[in-house]
Image (cartoon, rainbow, N blue to C red):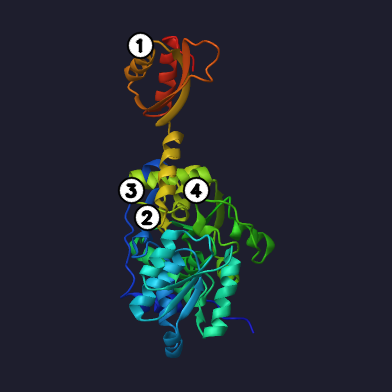
Amino acid sequence: MAEKPVTLAEIRAARRRIRDGVILTPCPESIPLSEITGSRIVCKLDNFQRTGSFKERGARNALLRLPVRARARGVVAASAGNHALGLAYHGRLLGIPVTVVMPEFAPLIKVTTCRRLGARVLLHGGDFSEARAEAERLVLAEGLAYIHGFDDRDIIAGQGTLGLEILEQVPDVDAIICPVGGGGLLAGVCVAVKALRPRVRIIAVESVATGNLTAALRAGRPVRVPRRATLADGLATLTVGARSLGLIRGRVDRVVRVEERWISLAILRMLELEKTVVEGAAAVPLAAMMSGAIGGLRGRRVALVVCGGNIDPVVLSRVIEKGLVHDGRLSRFTVRISDRPGGLAELCRVIASCGASVNQIDHDRAFSGPDVSATHVLCTVETRDRAHVALLHRALRKAGFRT
């Protein structure tokens, strides 16, 4: 007998259930993002949740749905990310013991944070499948309840509350652009939105490095997608959930994929224009709009699902630097100068005369050729844009420098 699909009634019940423990996150209009995309953009900021992601919605709903005895024994999950954080936080609030099994490569910050939130964290295995196998062993050995990160019925219903909020906060919304990895968030949003406003377009976005939903729709079933390095690590679940796929298919209007460079740039744009820190998975809706992967939305009211803000600070710093290079605001070139007094000063004079700012200069005397009176210098400069870079190079050539 086929399982009954998750319903709008379940999502509404989940919303009543979790209301006192999960933040009603804002969904403000963004004038700068509207200007760069041509649509009327609003951002559903679920990165404002206590643990930094939408995962709290499903986690709290699933925990509250547990029978009394299961609550006393506790729950277990295999996760190296936001699902673990959501369970740990709400498990502590509700007095439910939480065990999280993480792969041995899990980021130290997430291990530490989960422990600080009161969870028992076990490091096991070299990948997620090995961590999950250990979690399933604990289900049998300790009588714990396993809570799947994206394909659990109560998880999906909890995530669907985000869709209800968007419809209430933005009554004139024309389209919702949602990230998709395992599919729990997208499935919940699809059920809620299409039941109430079927004309609202729902567009799913993946990274070219993930592609779980694209592969599943092509095959007609969930298929395993090899893990590849991606900024949108929250989407790299290896496969979409079977239950989620059943809810998504027939409801999602379109699935698009974006390149990593656009995800990187979208993170920078959110930081600069919205003053909001987002993780890679949360940046893919904006990345899709900026890249031109989604057409037909000019002038339309579009909601971007900003699903989380848990990005490693080291990764964020690299993203910022790469984004500045992409914009032409950080430029590097090698130039040959006289290795006599005044040579470097003249180079700096030309750079300054163009309004550029020297960030760093490194001399390369050993590999600059046989002429001991000359040297190569590697210059990193701060500029306004690509046109400014071109202006600087013309000025350098005019002054006799070879770049």
* Res 141 → quadrant: bottom right
Looking at the image, tell me whether mark 3 or mark 1 is earlier in sequence order.
3
Mark toward the start of the polypeptide (2 vs 3):
2
Is the residue under label 4 in contact with that under label 2 (CB below 8 Å)?
no
What kind of element bears circle 4?
A: helix
Task: Name the residue rendered at 51%, 46% in the picture.
Answer: 295
* Spatial CA span between label 3 and label 4: 17 Å
| Three-letter code for the amino acid on which mark 1 is drawn | Gly
Q: Nearer the viewer, residue 7 or 179?
A: 179
**Depth order, front residue of 333/364:** 364
Residue 359: x and y in percent read 36, 29
Q: Tell me the residue that label 4 is attached to.
A: 288
Marks 3 and 2: in contact by CB < 8 Å? yes
From the viewer's side, name the closer residue of 202 and 108: 108
Residue 274 image label: 3
Residue 84 image position (x, y, % from top left) = 45, 68
> Which residue sits furthest right?
219
Q: Which residue lies at the image location 47% right of the left edge and 24% below the top edge?
A: 333
Q: Which residue is mark 2?
A: 43
Using the numbered discs, state the Cα–Cα distance from disc 3 to disc 1 in whole angstroms.
Answer: 44 Å
Mark in the foreground, 2 or 1: 1
Quadrant of image for the N terminus: bottom right
Residue that carries the numbered disc 1 in the rendered image: 342
* Residue 103 in view (yes/no): yes
Mark pair 2, 4: CA separation: 14 Å
Q: How many residues crowd around disc 3 within 10 Å: few (fewer than 14), some, or many (20 or more)?
A: some
Task: Name the amino acid, label 4.
Answer: Ala
Q: Amino acid at mark 2?
A: Cys
